Amino acid sequence: MKSHATRARIRVLIAKPGLDGHDRGAKIVVRALIDAGYDVIYTGLRQPPEAVAQIALEEDVDVIGLSSMAGSHVPYCQRLKKLLLENGLDDKLWIIGGSIPAPDQKALKAVGLDGIFPAGTRLEEIVDFINERCQ
Amino acid sequence: MTTQQFKPRQKTTGASIKQQDSNRSVINESGIEIKKTYTAEDLEASGGVAMVGLPGEYPFTRGIHKEMYRKRPWTMRQYTGFGDPEDTNERFKFLIENGQTGLNVAFDLPSQIGLDSDDDLAIGEIGRVGMAVDSLRDFEVAFDGIDLEKITVSLTINGAAAIMIAMYLAMAEKRGYDISKLRGTAQNDILKEFIGRGTWIFPVEPSIKLVADTIEYCANNAPKYSPVSVCGYHIRESGADPAQEMAYGFVIAKAYTDLVLARGLDVDEFASRLSFNFNIYGNIFEQVAKFRAGRGLWAKIIKEEYGATNPRSMVLRMIAGGGGSGLTKEQPEVNIVRGAYYALISALSGAQTMALCCFDEAYTIPSEDAQRLSLRTMQVLIEEMGLCDTVDPLAGSYYVETLTNQMRERMQAVMQEVDEQGGIVKMVAEGTIQSKVSTQAYELLQEIESGEFPKVGINCYEMDEEEPEVEYHPYAQDDADRQIERLQKLRAERDNAAVENTLAKLVDDATQGVNVMPAIMAAVKAYATVGEMTHALVSVYGRYNEPVRF
């Protein structure tokens, strides 16, 4: 359980990893999280792992969320994991959503993702998950 | 500490809340209220039949050809490409053997955004969502053994379109084709990439300058080639409604047209080679009315606003296909049925070319079986269902004609709205249009989640489902390695002094602001790579900085 007693609002980073340009889902999640009362930082497209780790550090976020529609998430998350560890960010809630095939979900859990929200997930499910894990 | 427990949602296993309310008002996605019955009076009140006309004649509402499918069915052009050019060549041949009549090339993401396969940013992305292309050599391999006069090729490429068009023309020339007679299409609609899909490279201004360069170059050198396919499609996928989809496509096409006219070309020198790409999912009658209305409106714009005199300049040639956003992960077999209805919409709409999303696409790059099933879906319509027997079969329906008039009005209103906000180029550069469509996407999802917008398998007729058995398309590391090897071998073997010279010339031409297509053609023929040419252009133009606003 992660504690953020001193903070009024949960801070969430939503990033588009890799080269994929399909951002409909990412932007929808950003809006849903803003409506749920979180502070949300959206990176825009094409963020390499280094940029995501850097922004997460600078923005002091509680949650790192990735949106992947084009399949490169497993090698990407393996590289990001290393950077999260190096930067002391491995205690942040780390989640991913998008087009995540079943075999990849297993691999991503092994890498250390806390939550996986494949296409079709209801928005409230993501909000509830963050609420529950960041209280 | 309070812990919110996630409560499993109650599934709706029966009809949608909408169908349970017989007194409901019905408003289509474009915001038009649908009456219970339509009569001659409704049609008259909506503007009558003034814009209907005859197929093959201005204003082309009923179709751009006199005989349409009676003479030749639509071109079947499934979107395909993965791995390296050899894998893709093999799949192309598979589709052609199964009756496909055109090719629609998918490029991998590094190629789409101008990176070579050995770029650090390309790791894990090589050949993943399309074929990897680094140089002219890859085009030679991908199209080997394919008759480019019999099979027209459409390149789904945008940010790097100028380079890929040059590669296609250079490859055809090398194989002995006369490029002044060569047909084919490039998507090359960068403005919509900034709104949805996202394969931009350069800032907005130089990006649209490149589009104008390709149109001008093709008008002068490859006049049968369609250098642009303006896409309402992806804007709809990003959240626009059907009327907006077409209206935004038109304001974008006008923006490119204006740029080319400013170079001194006559509208009749290039307008007949502008083509379009629109989406086919949703309400059948709304889509059919959209396409019929759009044809009339575009003809009117090109004739009345731009003063075209050649009727072929006025026709809205289009691929009407896809439907990705209409498909669901839930009960994926239902997507086979949806795909068949989408194909019906496209055929009833008089599209020149059709491509269908495959039923497994919510999960993976389509399997061969799924691709063949999409082809068979179209072939059944052609051979068994009478869709090719007569032109524009829905013409004269009180409902369809009234809705066509109303959709045209809605499109005109949307276009005016864009003008009032300073035009589409400004809206894209400032991110206002992106923000508008993504807000609408959010609102639509909320309506789907609440059940207000019915979607079978998602908010009605739901089932308890196991994760289906899917033939996932694996990432082929071997192919990626082979592609990098091939690239490095190319760099070692080619005449690098010649490459340097052509790249320097490209930088010069870009700096001076002249048309860069001749310089790109020269660089391509010297086997400069996609990454090298893009780098040369970035050194002059810079890179796009995405405006993010909510």
Image (cartoon, rainbow, N blue to C red):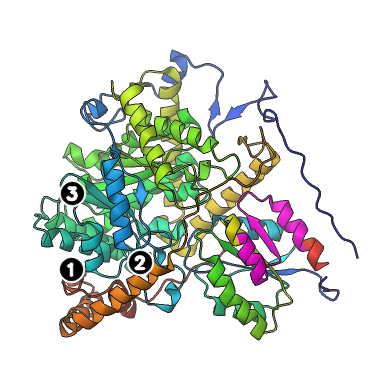
B371 shown above or below B397: below
Mark 1 residue type: Met
Quadrant hosting residue B136: bottom left
Using the image, tell me which numbered label, if any, was put on residue B521. Answer: 1
- Are the residues under badges 1 and 2 in a single subunit? yes
What residue span does the magenta drawing correspond to?
A105-130
Residue tagged 2 = B111
Q: Quadrant of residue B297?
A: top left
- Please tell me how crowded label 3 is: few (under 14), some (14-19), or many (20+) other residues with Cα within 10 Å: many
Taking B283 as reference, is B227 left or right? left
The secondary element bearing badge 2 is classed as helix
Whole-angstrom CA distance, mark 1 to mark 2, is 17 Å
Question: Residue B199 at x, y = what percent?
Answer: 41, 63
Are dots 3 and 2 in contact, CB under 8 Å?
no
Residue drawn at point x = 53 percent, y = 71 percent: A75
Give the number of the mark in front: 3 or 2: 2
Q: Which residue is mark 3?
A: B183
Q: Position of residue A54 (x, y in %)?
A: 60, 81
Q: Nearer the viewer, residue B332 or B441?
A: B332
Residue B518 visible in the snapshot? yes
Amino acid at circle 3: Arg
Residue found farthest to the right: B1
Image quadrant holding the N terminus of chain B, namely bottom right
Q: Nearer the viewer, residue B381 or B347?
A: B381
Exactly how many numbered labels are in the figure? 3
Mark 2, other Cα within 10 Å: few <14 / some 14–19 / many ≥20: many
Circles 1 and 2 in contact, beta carbons < 8 Å? no
Q: Left or right of B477: which side holds A3?
A: right
**3 and 2 marks on the same chain:** yes
Q: Amino acid at mark 2?
A: Ser
Residue at position x 48%, y 42% from top?
B359
Rendered-image quadrant of the C terminus of chain B:
bottom right
